Amino acid sequence: MNLNLRHLEAFAAVARLRSFTKAARALHVSQPSFTVQIKQLEEELGVRLLDRNTRSVSLTQIGHELVPVVERLLRELEGIVASTRALSSRSVGSVTIAALPSVSSTLLPSVIAEFRKQFPGIRFRLRDAVGKRIIDLVTSDAVDFGVGSAEKDDADVDFTALFTDSMSAIFPATSRLRRKKSITLRELASESLILTDTESTVRRIVDQAFALIGIPVIPVQEVSYMATAIGMVRAGLGVAILPSSALELDEMRSSKAIPIDSNELNRTVGIIQRRHRSLSPAAAAFLSTFRDTLRRPKIIRNLEVQQDGT
């Protein structure tokens, strides 16, 4: 079928104005061109839509029946175009992100608030997730992108580093450790450790670091979320090992953090996107804002922004 938008617009205009001359003028085309468009429409449909002579134009019965159908199609198309333009201009839309709990609780809320001042019509859905779960959400198109750590090369995703954070030991402010400037893994091994569960990238890094020095790590408490680990520290249940990006979860009044003396306890966090999938205008704009925010000084203590990730 060789019908196009011009044919439908021409028919709707002549049906409304009942004049080829007025309809052609309304559509800013010459009358001969307009007449050809109507003729092509009738030939393509195989029916006569208009009865016309030198004085008047009237709709045939089929023409009458076709008018509301064509007008509805044109309205729907106008709505689609308007919606697409609104999405393109980022005046409306949605952004869904899967992010590490530490990032979801510290960095992202303030960036979202700043972004929505400029684009109040954008809706956000933030899904806390750990480790492989973020990659699963990205590759299944359940989210626009993820913010996490890439555990291994994955042919289905692209990873762009944003920052590197190191692990710290967090303990009650009254602990005997409070006077130390740093602590070694061997010293930590004798403490009651509070660790994230085995599905998290933090736990994987911690387990590997202890394995390298030949000490198996057996936590006294395992948690899913870092805020829970900090709560347990406050209650005096042990010492937590958490990344620097999690320190903003605590005002450090009732607990203290010191760096761990190990080159193995670093975590690179970045953007995880499904390979060969373009972001929506809203998601792309937010990602740009997020990266700009990370360039600002003192966003998070001990956070090392990756220059190749900007």
Image (cartoon, rainbow, N blue to C red):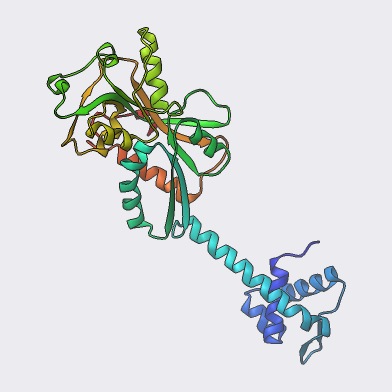
Q: Is residue 105 above or below residue 49?
A: above
Q: Residue furthest right?
A: 46
Residue 255 point in image, percent of width and height? 19, 32
- In what quadrant of the picture does the N terminus appear? bottom right
Tell me if I can see residue 11 in this picture. no
Q: Residue furthest bottom?
A: 55
Q: Is residue 102 left or right of residue 64?
A: left
Q: Residue furthest left?
A: 179
- In what quadrant of the picture does the C terminus appear? top left
In which quarter of the view is residue 31 placed? bottom right
In which quarter of the view is residue 214 placed? top left
Residue 100 point in image, percent of width and height? 40, 36
Marker count (numbered): 0
In which quarter of the view is residue 194 placed? top left
Q: Residue at 25%, 31% (x, y): give it.
A: 233
In this rendered view, identify the residue nearer to me: 116 or 224: 224
Tell me if I can see residue 23 in this picture. yes
Residue 286 point in image, percent of width and height? 40, 47
Q: Residue at 38%, 12% (x, y): give it.
A: 216
Q: Residue at 36%, 10% (x, y): give it.
A: 215
Q: Is residue 141 above or below residue 233?
A: below
In this rendered view, identify the residue nearer to me: 142 or 43: 142
Q: Is residue 195 above or below residue 137?
A: above
In this rendered view, identify the residue nearer to me: 295 or 221: 221
Residue 97 point in image, percent of width and height? 45, 44
